[in-house]
Image (cartoon, grey):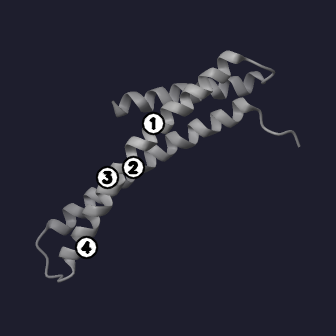
Amino acid sequence: MVPPSKLSVATGSVMRLVKEEASYHKEMAQQEARIKKLEAPSEDENAEYQLKQERQALEETKNVLPSVRQRIILALERLEQQLEAGGTESTEEIAKAKDAVAEAKKCIQEIS
């Protein structure tokens, strides 16, 4: 089996990080919904503890996002360098790489 090219590795890295970023945003939305639900008056004596835990989890998720964004930017730069360097990659790999670049740039714009 032929090992993957540097371009396909860089493409995979960018796509994985973009998916990771989306996953964190989805997780934040879910945590915010749980917090709203827990903020409603309740008979549950454990609600205050659960609310505190959810708020802490939300803050941790928010704190992770800047490092993920930075990793996306770095991976995007490496991928663009690989594309510029050219090589013996197939047109399919180059097309996937260009799609990944477009997806990462879209993700970065949404973040800003």
* Element type at mark 2: helix
Q: Distance between the residues labelled 1 and 4?
A: 31 Å
Q: In which quarter of the image is residue 22?
A: top left
Q: Distance between the residues labelled 1 and 2?
A: 10 Å
Where residue 34 appears, x then y in whole percent? 27, 63
Mark 2 highlights which residue?
64
Mark 2 or mark 1, which is nearer the start of the sequence? 2
Mark 4 highlights which residue?
50
Mark 3 highlights which residue?
29
The answer to whether residue 50 is left or right of residue 91 is left
* Element type at mark 1: helix
Query: Which residue does the image show at 31% across and 52% down from the upper left?
Result: 29
Where residue 72 appears, x then y in whole percent? 50, 35
Evaluate if marks 1 and 4 touch, with contact meaning CB atoms under 8 Å apart.
no
Mark 2 or mark 4, which is nearer the start of the sequence? 4
The answer to whether residue 59 is left or right of residue 36 is right
